[in-house]
Image (spheres, rainbow, N blue to C red):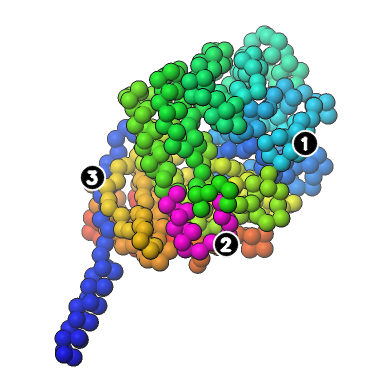
Amino acid sequence: MMKKLLLSATLFCSSILVQAQKETQLTIKPAGDQVVSKHIYGHFSEHLGRCIYDGFWVGENSTIPNKGRIRLDIVEALKKIKVPNLRWPGGCFADEYHWRDGIGPRNQRPKMVNTNWGGVTEDNSFGTHEFLDLCQMLDCEPYIAGNVGSGTVEEMAKWVEYLNFDGVSPMTAIRSQNGREKPWKVSFWGVGNESWGCGGNMTPAYYSDLYRRYATYARNYPGAPLKRIASGANSSDYNWTETCMKNIGDQMWGLTLHYYTLPTGNWGKKGSATKFDEAQYFSTMKNCLHMEELVSKHAAIMDKYDPKKKVALVVDEWGIWTDVEPGTNPGFLYQQNSLRDALIAGTTLNIFNNHSDRVKMANLAQTVNVLQALILTEKDKMILTPTYHVFDLYKVHQDAKYLPIAFTSPDYVVGDQKIPALNVSASQDASGAIHISLVNLDPNKKIALSTVLDGLKWSSVTGQILTSAKLTDVNTFNDLNKVHNANFTGARKSGSLLKVELPAQSVVVLELK
């Protein structure tokens, strides 16, 4: 009897050892023509809470280093991650924003109430010229959201003229009076925002007709063709996408999709940014992975009407949305940013990279002090969040050639539920270097990987990793670097194979040369 028990125990232990050592097999294929657009790595800055004011824009006599009141440490941090585009002025704010209130001498600009976000007074000191100065300092493209909800066709048409026309007209005369002779030639132009909700509570049929009217008068001026972007669906509203594709077609450059990851899935009580257990972490990541289904299904509808993929899917609002930090204005949407949020960022960007045949642009919500922010500020202090560090790792994918990947992920199991533990994307840059971004969502188990690079030549591998001891770990004003990127040594060449040991709860980017 004892021998049988010992034999059973030995077999059981051997079985566990084999399972622990079992490798996940990946195959990476050579690049075709598909490119991971740099614009997938875009950002969003709304007149909301402390994103603009007390974020990008400092007080008139501030001692914080600035140029024309634009905060320089934020500019330098964003330049480092090569921000390709910045969306402004909203969001919901865009459909109550009247651009002429934000030009001319600042002390003469009318004030307004920001009815969407906290009921605070907006002094319009940060307007069109200031935003475009910021974009020039960041060396990024501006993406302006026009007012369809409370604006007029004429108002939007004249804003485009003010921005883009290089000739003699009433708008260019005003622009010259305000200190700008030459046009900015802004390409990305949103025709409304969330027109199904805060942008006017419209039906898709009504909005798509209205879009055609507004877009007609948003003119292409010489040397300044517009990339007009229609206000698209909320989450799984596939009828909205169907209607817009049918009624607008290729009269738009892009069609938007908005989706936020809610830890609980409940808008009333979304869950804490910093206090959560593994069960809530699991539900958060399950909700994050829903982006794969949304992008796939919206893209399939777009394929039906646009098989040549001329119209871009623009996911211009995404990220985790939690309850605000205790003691902060509930209308300001200020939340901390943990390792969990970094895993969300890495996973979502992998999804976009893998759908880069259709997803040509995306914008994380939002850049500073709001929602899944890259940067948090407190007076002259600044935090780079875990999410910032993911964008720093992933900047290597911008405008690189997409490399297809085939693999079956191991499961991450909690109770009777499971999700894929692993997600991956890969690209090859102009120099020939291959970059592979890997996310292990399982907080308990490492993943052993064996990768075949089919037809791709390489001889060395280096890498960087973002992880921390706990999923709830955050960077604070007292501990700026608790969660940060570090060198990764868990990858090696074994014959023609790439062998990787991917730690639990980690984001890793490898470079093969």
Q: Amino acid at mark 3?
A: Gly
Give the extent of the magenta segment.
270-287
Q: Position of residue 314 (x, y in %)?
A: 47, 32
Q: Which residue is mark 1?
A: 121
The furthest residue to the top: 168
Q: Position of residue 60 (x, y in %)?
A: 81, 39
Tell me which residue sits at (71%, 35%) in the image. 115
Q: Which sits earlier in the primary sequence, circle 3 or circle 1? A: 1
Secondary structure type for disc 1: strand
Is 85 part of what is drawn in magenta?
no
The furthest residue to the bottom: 2
Q: Which residue is mark 3?
A: 455
- In 3D space, how far apart are the residues under numbered discs 3 and 1 (Cα atoms)? 60 Å
Q: Which sits earlier in the primary sequence, circle 3 or circle 2? A: 2
In the picture, measured across the screen, residue 82 lies left or right of residue 431, that is: right
Q: Please report contact status of discs 3 and 1: CB closer than 8 Å, yes or no.
A: no
